[in-house]
Amino acid sequence: MVGQGTAHGTAQDAAPASSARAAQGAADRAVVAVTGRPGARCGVADYADKLRAVVAARGVDVRLERLPRWSLGALLRIRARCGLGGRGVLHIQYPSLDMGNSPAVGLAPLTIGGRRLYLTLHEFSIFGRARKLYMLPFALSRATVIFSNAFERAAFERFFPIRRCRTDVVPIGSNIAVGAPAPERARALVYFGQIGPGKGLEAFLDVVGRLRAAGEDLDAVVVGSAPDRACPVFWEVAERAEALGLRLVLDAEPDRVSEELSRARVALLPFPDGVSEKRGSAIACLEHGLAVVTTHSDKTPDWLRDATVRHVGVAETAERVRTLLDRPEAAAPDLDAAPFRALRWPDIAERHAQLYGFR
């Protein structure tokens, strides 16, 4: 009887101990991701959502904290709510729409600590000097700063030659999953991305205008979001849409976006600063099998130069688009190439798990 009682007591004691170990294990593999609020049609916020899902699928507890703006109070509330213990981490995605450009983001290493702090900088080189200095506390902390491409990482390291943080490169994936392919691709030219300044939309409109003037029969489509419908670029698109025969597909759900990309033959994305791995819209178009015409610059890696057709000027690009509309296979990307495999979400999730120390 004593033996039975001892065994029973041991089993009862073991269950709470097992539960405690499981709870501690979960805390050790917890991630709190910080991004902007939903509904902003922000590529960074969408990326954070997708990353949360694929990392969580690997057995990691991931919570998404959405902030309306950066402030000391918001960071203190996150610290209080997170309760990060063990090996749990906090991962900030920066910048995102509607969160503003307050220097308060730089207080994160001071309020939360750096050793378990991760920051993905989707932009850095285009920031002004003052905004770059917001990142000084990260550079001097033990945080890990992640970039989508080597160009942005090099810009950060040149600006902060003295630093304690760890830097790394993890490519971003497409926020638009490839759906069912269209039975037959239309003779369509598409622009996909945010409608605003610095995106090259003016050049897209000029190319469409030249093709229309030459009597080209094509479906011209602008697919994207317009965070600020009062901006001059949006008004130019809206005002020229009827004259150019443009279809506007605004603020569409990902499935609808995928349908539009799957039915088109050519994408024209004339980014003023050149295409690079940080351009999720270009990655989405390539993964949907479009021939992509875009700007090349010193930010463009060799594999993206090889996978895209160079945009130089309106007249020359109009001729290249005309050719590709008839023979899109001439510039079809090789989606089995190693650089494209690195952009797939399972690989991206695994890279993050390794950086977090969960592998």
Image (cartoon, rainbow, N blue to C red):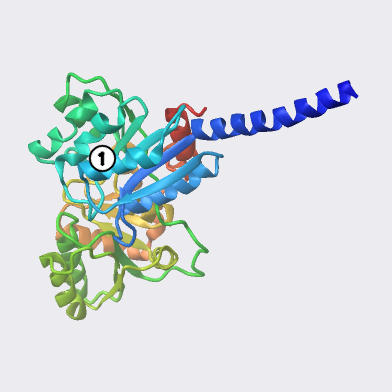
Q: Quadrant of residue 348?
A: top left
Q: Which of the pair 293/41 is nearer the observer?
A: 41
Residue at the outermost bottom position: 242
Q: Which of the pair 323/273 is nearer the observer?
A: 273
Residue at the spot 54% in from the left edge and 35% down from the top edge: 26
Rendered location of residue 331, percent (x, y): 37, 52
Residue at the spot 81% in from the left edge and 29% down from the top edge: 8
The kind of residue tagged 1 is: Thr
From the viewer's perspective, tell me whether residue 100 is left or right of residue 118: left
Q: Which of the pair 61/230 is nearer the observer?
A: 61
In the rendered image, which quarter contains the N terminus?
Answer: top right
Rendered location of residue 106, percent (x, y): 20, 35
Rendered location of residue 346, percent (x, y): 51, 41
Residue at the spot 38% in from the left edge and 54% down from the top edge: 284
Residue at the outermost front position: 2
Rendered location of residue 73, percent (x, y): 23, 44
In this view, 21 is above or below 75: above
Residue at the outermost left position: 129
In this view, 190 is above or below 4: below
Badge 1 is on which residue?
300
